[in-house]
Image (cartoon, rainbow, N blue to C red):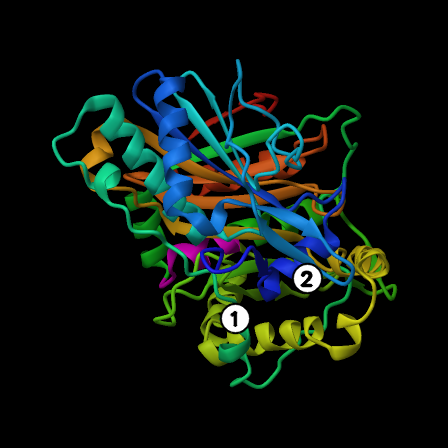
Amino acid sequence: MLKDKKYRRLDSQAKVFTLVSNSKYCSVFRFTVRLKEKIDGDVLLKAYKGSFEKFKAYKVKLHFGLFEYSLVQNDKEPKIFEVDEEPVIKKINNKDNNDYLIKLTYSGEELYFDFYHALTDGTGAVKFIREVLGRYFELKYNTEEKEYLLDKTVIQNSEDIYVKLSSKYEKISYPFSEGYRVFGTTRKDDNVEINHFSLNINEFKNKAKEKGATISMYITAIIAYTFYLLSRENKYKKNRNGKDLKPINLCIPISLEKYFEEKTLSNFFSHMFVSFDLKENKEYTFDEMLESTKSQYEEKIKLEKIMGVLNGNITKMNNPVLKVIPLAIKKFSFVAGSLKMKKQFSMTVSNVGKLEYDPKFNDYIDSSYVTLACDWAEKVKCGICSYKDEFIISFCSNIYEKDFENTFKTIIEELGFDYEIFGNNYSLMI
């Protein structure tokens, strides 16, 4: 903890993000919060700075050591940035951002919180955003309760609690062959296209329930079926061994806070993998894809399965031999290794669940959603959340073609959903 020492080791998941991150894989995710009134930049900066005084674990910068990265206390002032339109989600520029691993940008009524994944996960990010919003609203609107301004409690728990928990579970690894991925013409500029599908959460939940599925199961099946339909259209058709098609391999991050009493501001999640092996001459219905999704969730969402996958990854990261390899060499080998690993994933589908900020400020907030930065391998990534009555599925893409998003749109229409689409580019056929 930075209260007692200047340096802090990275958690086990963060080590992976720092080693594989480069110009083509930035490991950044974004939470957008849209307010009902135009943002006051001066008040926002005060609220932002004050939040770091409470969240000392985030007042840090990344240090490149001889054998490993570490987090170092950052004595520079936090900055915020005003822009005319939604900024590109990309690697955080350390120099421009005074070395902070969180970047806050605003435009009109919208706030964009970008987080480097080596610092925290979505659960930790929401805790920090809640603090910033609470301070902002109390400063801006002079609310009666000064809960955020008067509370001097410093949140320090940034312990790497993976090792002590995961070691109790048997290691599990799921062997994958190279999966379907979204292909297309990579944009030459530095831009990405973000398209958000907004549905009613209650309608979506009811339709899932009719099929005996959860929200997560239902949306996973829709995304898997999108890949399948594209394979039928020969969009992503690649034969494997001359017979079977490449499988659809979806990577589903799972927060561990709901399983354990331990709390941390560092990363605290594992993964579940949902895979579909497709046969060349067989046609699949959406209901068949959903039934497969349900059975895989019921089997793989079990704690021993999730922790077994995590234990396998942590064991690799804490290999004694790995610890004595110079960081520059280690990073080079990890980036090279990630090339093969990333080709196994068809898409990362991160559902952070229901976003909950302080209820007494709900009247000031219009909407909120999450976006994952795409990369060289996963040219389209998916972030999912709900806020109030909205259920928002967000696709971030670095290619010009919109075959995946348009096919997804067709499926939700056929399933009977009402929806709206918004984003930084309206190239979809709507």
Range of residues picked out in magenta: 212-221
Residue 410 lies, in percent from the top left, at 53, 37
Q: CA distance from mark 2 to mark 1?
A: 20 Å
299 up-or-down from 270: above or below: below
Any part of residue 391 in sight? no
Tag on residue 296?
1
Report the residue marked by disc 2: 282
Observer-nearest of 86 and 273: 86
Find out whether residue 217 is within the magenta segment: yes
Estimate the x, y position of residue 23 in percent, counting from the top left: 76, 40
Q: Are marks 2 and 1 in contact (CB under 8 Å)?
A: no
Which class describes the residues within 10 Å of circle 1: few (<14), some (14-19), or many (20+)?
Answer: some
Instruction: Name the residue located 71 percent from the left edge and 42 percent from the top edge.
Output: 375
The secondary structure type at the circle numbered 1 is helix
Looking at numbered disc 1 in the image, what kind of residue is underneath it? Gln
Quarter holding residue 187: top right
Residue 372 percent location from the top left of the image: 57, 42
